[in-house]
Image: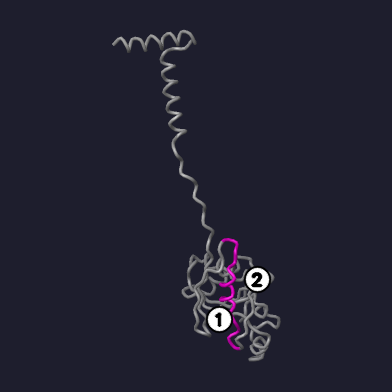
Amino acid sequence: MQLKTSVAALVAITAVSIGVGPNSIASGLHATNSSSLRTTESKPADLPTAPAEYRLHLHHLHTGEDINIVYRIGNTYLPDALEQLNHFLRDHRTQDVRNYDPREFDVLHELMTSLGHPNGVIDIVCGYRTPWSNRFLRTRAASTGVAEHSQHMLAKAIDIRVPGVKTTTLRNAALALHAGGVGFYPVSQFVHVDVGPVRQWQYR
């Protein structure tokens, strides 16, 4: 009892000397102690965000081959993956390979993401074409829809289908990207996408 009285007296004397009430001092001491506890609490460090992976899953309708590969991480293209994609998209008539503009792969990835199928399969109707193959296709009939200076010969174009997605839906999604040329072939049921100048057309 005597100790409690002494502490109370000390608080009262201090309060008188600085011109505040005992309750204020007690509150201040409590706040100081709480603040000290808060500052000593450990905070979880912010974990670094892993760079995004860009994946393509392709099926070639002429060769029967499949490829499911990450070709880019963050802003870095993976050379080995690009080499595999270039071979996969080779001219299936001559087996010639040409290095694709990697932006074409980005268009395919963004297109599938916009369709809500980021890991879906893309059917490849036509990839790279040599000048010989391009001439061959142009001379098969009076009207073929094959351009004389096709972006396919520059390895900047791919003709595609997406299983389960209507060709008109695929065409509209490609147009919405404003990433290059979009050709619509409703009879043959495929869409041409390239990274050349922005333009569109429909054959038959």
Q: Secondary structure at mark 2?
A: loop
- 88 part of magenta stretch: yes
The range drawn in magenta is 74-93
| Residue picked out by circle 1 | 125
Residue farthest to the right, as pictured:
149
Mark drawn on residue 81: none
How many C-alpha atoms fall within 10 Å of the one at disc 1: few (<14), some, or many (≥20)?
Answer: some
The answer to whether 42 is drawn above or below residue 153 in the figure is above
Q: How is the image coloured?
A: one colour
* Residue in the image at 55% along x and 68% along y: 109
Q: Quadrant of residue 10?
A: top left
Which class describes the residues within 10 Å of circle 2: few (<14), some (14-19), or many (20+)? many
Where is residue 21 shown, x and y percent of the image?
44, 12
Q: Earlier in the sequence, mark 1 or mark 2?
A: 1
Residue type for callout 2: Val
Please name the residue that numbered disc 2 is placed on: 195
Quadrant into which the N terminus falls:
top left
